[in-house]
Amino acid sequence: MRLYMFVAGALAAGLVGAAQAEEPAQDYSAALSRMLTATAAGTCPEDVMGPGLLAACRQQVEAMAAGLSRLGAVETLTFIRAEDGTYGRVEFYTVRFAGGHSMVWAIGGLSDGKFEVAYSNG
């Protein structure tokens, strides 16, 4: 199952740079969990999504809700790494769902308390 949530007009590969940050997560996990949970329920959470990500979510929410809801509730998020790139810091997490499936998700582009980047490629 492939699920995608992108900043409009941007490809995931171009969002992050090669330099990896060594510092631990800056608590992007709570926002990612909120995004995944809300999207699985068929809504795009305006409180954590910036304008570009919110617009992309609204275009894809029906398909994403179906895919995410089949995975079950978010059980755990485990920080993998952070990278600095075009949109600033992007953090990568392994997300484990109640149905037993795990996926790697990225979140970043934090501006004014909201994120402009959230995606998974598998």
Image: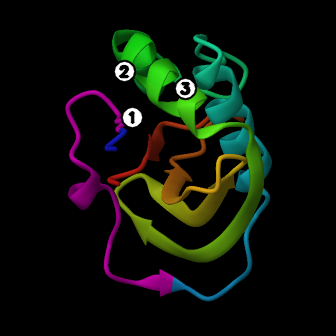
Looking at the image, tell me whether mark 2 or mark 3 is earlier in sequence order: 3
Three-letter amino acid code of the residue under disc 2: Ala
How crowded pointer 2 is (Cα within 10 Å; few <14, some 14-19, many 20+) is rated as some
Q: Main secondary structure of the magenta part?
A: loop
Three-letter amino acid code of the residue under disc 3: Gly
From the viewer's side, name the closer residue of 17 and 72: 72
Identify the residue at image location x=55%, y=31%.
Answer: 70
How crowded pointer 3 is (Cα within 10 Å; few <14, some 14-19, many 20+) is rated as many
Q: Which residue is mark 2?
A: 56
Contact between labelled residues 3 and 2, with CB atoms less than 8 Å apart: no
Instruction: Identify the element where label 3 is drawn.
Output: loop
> Does 64 sit above or below residue 32?
above
Contact between labelled residues 2 and 1, with CB atoms less than 8 Å apart: yes
Quarter of the view holding residue 38:
top right
Q: Is 45 colored magenta in this rendering?
A: no
From the viewer's side, name the closer residue of 51 and 65: 65
Quarter of the view holding residue 36:
top right
Looking at the image, tell me whether mark 1 or mark 3 is earlier in sequence order: 1
From the viewer's side, name the closer residue of 94 and 23: 94
Identify the residue at image location x=50%, y=56%.
Answer: 106
